[in-house]
Image (cartoon, rainbow, N blue to C red):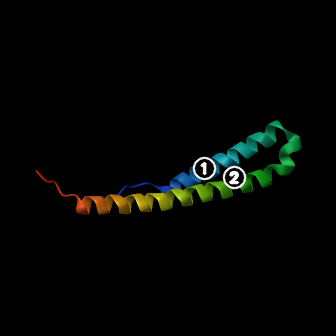
Amino acid sequence: MKIDIDFDELLNNAVNSAIDATVNMSGKNPNASGHAEQFERIAKISANVTVKILREYHTALENSLSCVSQTDVTTH
């Protein structure tokens, strides 16, 4: 069974959200602007790790569903 998920789009959305949040934070609190780059880097790493986990889970789920559908035998 194939489940189409655009993981690149998920990653891009997460990274863009992280950048937007960092810019927002910097604009509202000038004292935090020195840390903005660090926060953005942490958010990007977190997004990459999360999407990597989702990709692996997705692959495992597809494999499991394929195995089930191949061995699915209906008995009456």
Q: Name the residue: 22% across, 58% down.
A: 72
Earlier-in-chain disc, 2 versus 1? 1
Tell me residue 31's x, y (percent). 89, 42
- Please tell me which residue is depicted at 72% across the width and 55% down the height of the picture: 42
- Would residue 10 be found to the left or right of residue 73 on screen? right
The x, y position of residue 5, in whole percent, is 43, 54
Residue 47 picture quarter:
bottom right
Q: Quick check: marks 2 and 1 in contact, CB under 8 Å?
A: yes
Q: Which residue lies under the disc numbered 2?
A: 43
Task: Pick the quarter of the image with the N terminus.
Answer: bottom left
Residue 19: x, y in percent?
69, 49
Please identify the residue farthest to the top as the structure is shown: 28
Evaluate whether residue 54 shows in this view. yes
Looking at the picture, tell me which residue is in the foreground, 52 or 18.
Answer: 52
The outermost residue toward the front is 76
- Residue annotated with mark 1: 14
